[in-house]
Image: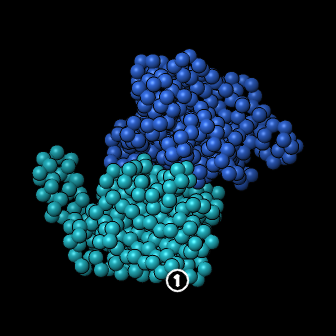
Amino acid sequence: MGGWAIAVHGGAGVDPNLPPHRQEEAKKLLTRCLNLGISKLRSNLSAIDVVELVVRELETDPLFNSGRGSALAANGTVEMEASIMDGNGRRCGAVSGLNTVKNPVSLARLVMDKSPHSYLAFSGAEDFARQQGVELVENEYFITEENVGMLKLAKEANTIVFDYRIPAVGSETCSAVAESPLQMNGLPISVYAPETVGCVVVDNQGRCAAATSTGGLMNKMNGRIGDSPLIGAGTYACNLCGVSCTGEGEAIIRGTLAREVAAVMEYKGLGLQEAVDFVIKERLDEGFAGLIAVSNKGDVACGFNTTGMFRGCATEDGFMEVNIWE
Amino acid sequence: MGWAIALHGGAGDIPVSLAAERRRPREAALRHCLRVGVDALKAQKSPLDVVELVVRELENNPHYNAGRGSVLTREGTIEMEASIMDGKTKRCGAVSGLTTVVNPISLARLVMEKTPHIYLAFDGAERFAREQGIETVDSSHFITQENIERLKQAKEANRVQIDYTPPIQNDKKKETPIADGDSQIGTVGCVAVDSHGNLASATSTGGLVNKMVGRIGDTPIIGAGTYANNLCAVSATGKGEAIMRGTVARDVAALMEFKGLSLKEAAAYVVEECVPKGNVGLVAVSAKGEVTMSYNTTGMFRACATEDGYSEIAIWPSVHN
């Protein structure tokens, strides 16, 4: 048994021109969340409790695209979704289409623990939230000024803002600029592009868990479901590993990306980092995505084919890293 | 190498004593749908078109739990879901929470072909259906008298559980009602491969009797209820929650891809080793034109045919096995 390990992410695909102070803000939040997870792991909280707690923290902070700060659907409201999975017993819970639940990941946990089902969505999920007495807030609570501005621009340009389609640095910079003409406050809109969050943990008993939460795509069609709530796509955990993905939802769904990492470990005998590299390289086709993973041995790994990914990880032997770029 | 097709109308605790008047219309539907699928394959229709066509037929048949004949939620409403996937391109589409769309599988196909997304649900999916001009009807069209009765029985059984009545009484309850023979779990699906090795899979359902409003099962989830790639196509049925956590459809393909198992071996492994007994059934075809239909329940409504003339329509384990 290799001890505990934890990784968090705040989405894949970062504008290379992201101003330094925003980079610092993101790193600070990731560090705070890591430290929260680490302290809970040290006090022997189980992996499933730790991933929920860390993702709650990320949802509550408006910086990333989940909970408060969620991207806005075409009609200007938020439609949040999340999922959580306990590798121990492969129990899971998921929610979609939430607009008043303060912490979607905790409702996903309640679906897992307190309902006969694994996945509840839209008004049925909101009804369940009220029955369970979880904290509810007005839809306005989730909506930030920046996201209102972004939606307006996205609508004017009649486009869905994909956070992972951010032009790579150096490669045809001119055309990249021409491709993303949307500007807000004098900066390309991609600087503000909101990102999904997730956390994976293995505790010192070797139990793995994963959780992912998102507001989805800016200007998405109402009713759109992405990869984040889908077990095997955005989130997966079993007795071998825990995985949380972020990026182009449609590519992650058709690649069953999170399960794929576990499947090549289970059926092909690959190690964790090998499995992550294989999946990012071979399973995304033309899609863009990133993922974080831990194994039951206490290894931690991440991989992405986007420009940058907000991420952090730590292990029991004292290793800790928070990074945005490669 | 040749074409092959398999379809199912749900796996579950189907009593061998199933009354003939309940068994016959379902067998007739299997035979009819298999014929529709085989004819379409012979007419060189693409597997994607074939699975959509066959699942539409099954949705339109009131004896199966999809489209007309969908089971009811706790509130007595219907919430249908479906998904479809093309093996070669891995393109896919899915829908949940439909209340008026006559053929959910065709809306899933439209999500795949006409939106930037893969999966639309509830009001947004219904709105998209209207934009696309697909056939819609009043919700009452889907509700059969049999399903109203079934919900009533399920609710009574549920009350017993909630009240912590001793299990003995629970068992008594179980024997009397729902002896109509189909389990509360039922779904329809079809997989097909053409002689060029193109594969496709489609699955559609009304979900579970007495399900919570808003409940999503395995059927619309790519990798759980439905999956297709360049090796095989799979459609699963049974207890949605177990299928979801077992990523059943993707795992059949993953075992072939990563462990080199044959289609039959992979399907048998998933059904026997990965999902608890009584929870799952699946149909699958491979790019080579092989077909397999496995389940760990009492029975599964199923049918298949291959180009070399093999054909089977069955509910319980066949005597030859």
To which chain does the residue with label 1 belong? Answer: B
Query: A135 or A213, which is in the foreground?
Result: A213
> What letter labels the chain drawn in cyan?
B
Quarter of the image containing the N terminus of chain A? top left
What x and y, as percent, mark residue A101? 46, 39
Q: How many marks?
A: 1
Disc 1 residue type (three-letter): Asp
Quarter of the image containing the C terminus of chain A? top right
Taking the spot 46% from the left edge, 51% from the top edge, the residue there is B247
What x and y, as percent, mark residue B295? 36, 61
> What letter labels the chain drawn in blue?
A
Tell me where residue A40 sits by quadrant: top left
What x and y, as percent, mark residue A3? 48, 22
Left or right, residue B65 beside residue B15: right
Whether B66 is drawn above or below A99: the answer is below
What x and y, as percent, mark residue A260? 55, 46
Query: A30 or B139, which is in the foreground?
Result: A30
Viewer can see residue B125: no
Question: Would you name the residue on which mark 1 appears?
Answer: B39
Q: Secondary structure at mark 1?
A: helix
Query: B70 or A6, which is in the foreground?
Result: A6
Tell me where residue B26 sits by quadrant: bottom left
Taking the spot 45% from the left edge, 61% from the top edge, the residue there is B264
Query: B117 or A77, which is in the foreground?
Result: B117
Whether A76 is drawn above or below B148: the answer is above
